[in-house]
Image (cartoon, helix red, strand yellow):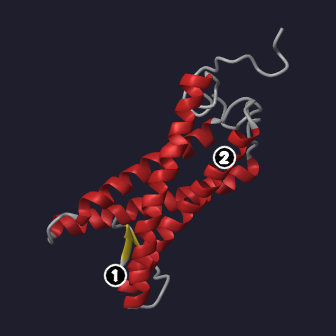
Amino acid sequence: MTLRSDQRRWGGVAKTFHWLMALGIVGAGVLGLVMTGMERGMAKLNAFALHKSIGLTVLALFVLRLAWRFFDRRPADLPMPRIQRITAHAVHGVLYLFMLAIPLSGWIYNSARGYPLQWFKQFNLPALAEKSDDLAQLAIGVHVWLFWLLVVVLAAHVGGALLHHFFERDDTLRRMLPFARLRATPPGDAP
């Protein structure tokens, strides 16, 4: 597997960003759901700290991923109906927006509540806003709503990949899977 993407598949760096961020997003989401139901105490505080650290990691990976996209090429779209291509690009755009907005809204909430923000207990990050109950309520509302919208968009993203894999039988999913071999003949190589 090459580090850079080519005309047919995503490269190793793009795949690594994709799957690390997927793990981080799912981990932060599951932890967020679990921690809200926990009783007050050190376990809950530690869960919140871990949730915040994972969210900050997703944000940092997003910035690195975006920077990498400027240097890496994008594989050509596979043949598909125009509406599918438009939908796929729109879903990816919305996912990118959520990968930025959800961690930032959490950071703003944390700042507006006046809580310190640490990354895995290694260093503190600056507040993004002054302490404000109104801003905190707005930020947590945005954070929660965006999370649930993300769940819907991720379901569409995963559903689309599985649709292409099992029903369209093309390489959409295989191009992003680590170590997967492509099954389709590249365009222009068909007999």
Splitting the image into 4 quarters, where does residue 79 fall?
A: top right
Residue type pointed to by label 1? Tyr
| In-image side of 39 versus 80 (left or right) | left
Q: Which residue is mark 1?
A: 115
**Lower position in the chain sequence, tag 2 or tag 1:** 2
Q: Is residue 31 above or below residue 143?
A: above
Q: Which residue is mark 2?
A: 87
Q: Is residue 96 above or below residue 155?
A: below
What residue lies at 70% left-to-right and 38% top-to-bottom? 4
How far apart marks 2 and 1 lie (CA) works out to: 39 Å
What residue lies at 57% left-to-right and 54% top-to-bottom? 95
Residue type pointed to by label 2? Thr
Measured from the top left, where is residue 184 in percent x and y? 69, 18
> Dot 2 surroundings within 10 Å: few (below 14), some, or many (20 or more)?
some
Secondary structure beneath dot 1 equals loop
Residue 177 seen in the figure: no
Q: Is residue 108 above or below residue 27?
A: below
Residue in front for this viewpoint, 161 or 39: 161
| In-image side of 36 versus 157 (left or right) | left
| Quadrant of the image containing the N terminus | top right
Residue 181 seen in the figure: yes
Measured from the top left, where is residue 115 in percent x and y? 34, 81
| In-image side of 115 versus 8 (left or right) | left
What residue lies at 55% left-to-right and 31% top-to-bottom? 163
Residue in front for this viewpoint, 109 or 20: 109
| Quadrant of the image containing the C terminus | top right
